[in-house]
Amino acid sequence: MNYLYSRLNKSQITSGLLKEYAIEFNNWDNFTGTQLHDSNFVSLTEWRLLYAGLYSSQITSTPKMLYLDTLNRLLNKYSQPNQPISMPVLYYHYQSIKPTALTVNLLRNENGQLVDVAGRTQSPYDTKEMFAIAPILQATFTGTSQIIFRSDLLLGNTGKTVRTVEVDANGSGAWQTVALNTPFNLTYTTEGFYNINIRITYTDNSQRLGHTKLAVHAKPVNGASMMRTFRKQSSLASATEFRFAPDTYGDNPLEPVAAPAARPFAGASATGQMIIEFARNNTTGQIRKPLIVVEGFDMTNEYFYRDFADELENDFNNRPETPITLNDNLDDIGEYDVIFLNFNNATDFIQRNAFLLEAVIGRVNAEKGLYNCIRRPTWINLTGVCSIGRKCATEKAAQ
């Protein structure tokens, strides 16, 4: 990567952040702060990945972003149970190479390196923005809780000054002004996942929008939350007593269907099954926000979608009384539709199974295109070896 960009005059990368130099964990185009849609809900996980992506985009010494361990210590400082829920804000400018930079002769390729074209009349870079807000803790109890926007958690490089912060606590459109560095009360009478919309106005009159979700649990009775902690172990007598509807990945998948036909490798094609389960709030019956999960190297061929779903039940909110699992994060917060690819022979040639994954991605792209899905597919390879994903990505890039 350094070789590719080593000959560029980086003075026109004014932010010192170049998207093409980064590891893009998320689709940055979704997080501009200009509109709210189902592909830019942000939990702390997405927020960290956005920051990490920007951190990896530092192509000069200009940005001086906080080291990741320094950022983690800062977030941990405000994650104690007796503190209001802090809402870190991320707002950065960065540069991206214009899609036409090579074709209109703003940059040229010399021996695999990008080189500036002398005498060009415009910059080869577009300046873009990234904006995201998330709670450090994703869950609370019924009754009154507090959130807070802290000055030392306003991270960015825009040079703008916050004039007002407004919060819509339940997605109803009722905005309330919140003072910086002052706890703000949120009151919820019933359990559930609540949309929280945030609008920040800066002194130059520009506004940016972000939204997240907060899981509200029943207030503890005798010190125990009324919310489940794991799919297989409820804090109550039976699963039927869950206060939240126990609708998580693995509960309502569609019937498995044969994966689409794949290109052959060494005279044969891989086969497999697709299992689709829509996000809880997706009632359209169509794929809207795809997350493709790919079976790993399964020696016994006994790993299936149910096993994957069960593994999503570990709590990462670090509070047993208000658990948030990866299942909650992906389903209720991220609203992903899961497409699980199960190979009929998970130990087959890597190339053969990669071609099957390629066919599945093509099918998902075609279906989401029919229904105006704005989210490109995200995918996870469950094996410790990334060869299948690497092979598939290489093939798709070549196309």
Image: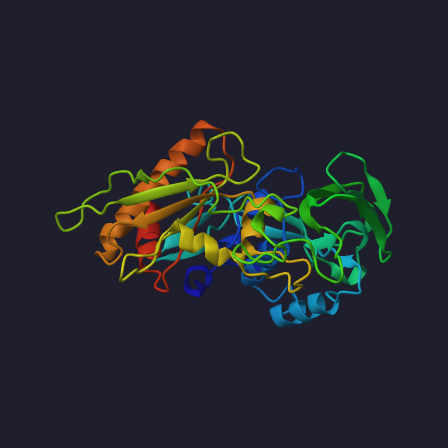
* Left or right side of 9 for 393: left
Count of numbered marks = 0
- Residue 180 at x, y percent in the picture: 85, 54
- Residue 296 at x, y percent in the picture: 34, 58
What residue is at 67 percent from the left and 63 percent from the top? Answer: 319
What residue is at 47 percent from the left and 30 percent from the top? Answer: 285
What residue is at 55 percent from the left and 44 percent from the top? Answer: 247
Check the image and name the residue furthest to the front. Answer: 237
Q: Nearer the viewer, residue 76 or 144?
A: 144
What residue is at 51 percent from the left and 29 percent from the top? Answer: 284
* Left or right side of 207 for 397: left
Picture quarter with the N terminus: bottom left
Say how the picture is coloured.
Answer: rainbow
Picture quarter with the C terminus: top left
- Residue 381 at x, y percent in the picture: 39, 56
* Left or right side of 209 for 359: left
Q: Nearer the viewer, residue 259 or 192?
A: 192
Q: Is residue 274 something that shows in the picture?
A: yes
In the image, residue 58 above or below residue 394: below
- Residue 322 at x, y percent in the picture: 68, 58
Quadrant hosting residue 298: bottom left
Check the image and name the residue furthest to the left. Answer: 267
